[in-house]
Image (cartoon, helix red, strand yellow):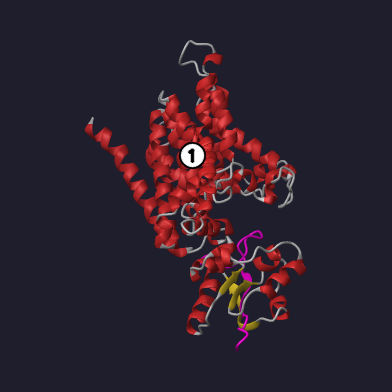
Amino acid sequence: MMSRFLAPRLRVYLWLTASAALAVALVFLFPDSSQQDGGHHFLFARWAWTHPEMFVGVWSRPLFTLLYAFPAQLGYPAAKLFSALISLATAWQTWRLAEEMKLDRAPLAIPLLFLQPSFFLICTDTMTEPLFALIFVVALRLHLCGRVNAGMLVASTLILARPEGFFLGLLWGVWVLSSDREPRVWWRHLPSTLLLASGALVWWLAAWLLTRDPLFIKHNWPTNWHVTSMVYGSGALWSYIVRLPEIVGLWLLAPFLSGLTFLLARRKLSAITSTFLLFFILHSILRAYGLFGSAGYPRYFVSISPAIALITLAGWNEMARWFAHLHRPIKTACAVLILAISAYTCFMYADGAEWTRDARAVADTYSWFRAHPQPVQRFIWSQAYMCILFDRDPWEKPVFSNDYESNLQLLRASPGGTLVFWDARIGPTWHKLAAADFEAAGYLRLHAQTYTLRGYWLTRSWFGYGGPREQEMYLFYKPSDDR
């Protein structure tokens, strides 16, 4: 009995140790976030003590900012390591949930979580999805073990991490009302579901007390998040079907689809399958019609990565029965090969994400400025990592718009001693300002450098993904009037 107890635990610790080593390596291999959102969320958390409204801001995400406000004071790497801890805690909780659901090979839930390409990509980023996933799996464990009210209280905080918490809260209410744990009719459960609104109520109350504005959340709502804003365009209704390999993993797609089919047919683990279907249908519709500024990112599904891992595990177990007649060494070798290829593919996916490579060019340009310093009164930047390295208050940056002339006027109105750190891709795309515009506004070009940025391993394009990224970095400076 002792060996039967220790073996699964030992596998859990080995998987967690390997995942922890991997996460630490990713922190230092990819020092910036895979997208600009991660850097902005870090800046919100680091400067929330200076700008307290960030603790209750819509885009800054109240729960994320509150938790990260402490490690963010130690720097960007510390915040990314904190994200790694959140990802490891999510893996632990996913394994515990697999055990409680009595799924075979429960320790395998840990690699099936980390080997989801989108989870792998942002498991150490300062993004909100891993935190959402941790809250989700903890709340689900409470719900399924019979602590329904506690589960609703925890689930109510999902809205404080990401907007999808609202829709998942509605689904959670359906679970509670349709529960057969008690013989009472469904409408008697209805008052208890108000617990699902407690997180939003706390957010509103905190915002009111902190800002003295009872409608702060409404007034703080991002302008490009309107229902029909289509700020990132729209996509096909089947966009997420095509991108399932980025969500689940190309080599794990067969067990995932097998698990989803099996669970739906047998009506098992309905909380897990309904969560995935809700997210899949919701985000497919949002992307198809460009609603609420949906950008169609696969990383949105990291929010429910524990559910995806458990569906994949159920399919893995089902497929294992198909090959039960094979010799054990052959089955073990096949399983190891699938996991090893999945790990390699995930690293290629992260290495091919060309946005992360800009960090090297940003760091190189920052080093140049430290060797050639100038007094800085104001700092303007095009990428969040620039602001992070200089450790400047992000609110120094003017609020640029789509109005070109208005943006030029903001540049001209900036005081002497203004330093501009700009790039040739994100800056012109987001703010409609190219390098020549700064010189036209009276800025001196201090430095310009062109870069060809390649991955560590993926040095050329594969099927249009992961090729060299051509980038250029600039430093502009507005001289003081007395110079």
State which quarter of the image contains the C terminus: bottom right
Q: In this view, does 464 lie above or below 278?
A: below
Magenta-colored span: 455-483
Choose top left, top right, bottom left or bottom right for residue 72: bottom left
| Residue situated in front as seen by the camera: 256 or 193 | 193
Q: Is residue 130 left or right of residue 15?
A: right
The residue carrying pointer 1 sits among few (fewer than 14), some (14 to 19) or many (20 or more) residues within 10 Å by Cα, namely many
| Residue situated in front as seen by the camera: 209 or 401 | 209
Amino acid of disc 1 = Ala
**x and y percent of residue 428 in the render?**
70, 68
Name the residue rendered at 49%, 54% in the picture.
Answer: 126
Name the residue rendered at 51%, 44% in the picture.
Answer: 209
Name the residue rendered at 55%, 64% in the picture.
Answer: 394
State which quarter of the image contains the N terminus: top left
Q: Main secondary structure of the magenta part?
A: loop
Asked if residue 331 shows in the view, the reply is no
Give the secondary structure at mark 1: helix
**x and y percent of residue 54 in the render?**
53, 52
Residue annotated with mark 1: 309
Inspect the magenta stretch and tell me whether residue 441 lies in it: no
**x and y percent of residue 364 in the render?**
52, 76
**x and y percent of residue 285 in the render?**
70, 39
Q: In this view, does 265 lie above or below 207?
A: above
Q: In this view, does 63 lie to the left or right of 381?
A: left
Choose top left, top right, bottom left or bottom right for residue 414: bottom right
| Residue situated in front as seen by the camera: 257 or 303 | 303
Q: Residue furthest front?
A: 212
Q: Which residue lies furthest to the left in this view?
A: 2
Name the residue rendered at 43%, 64% in the picture.
Answer: 28
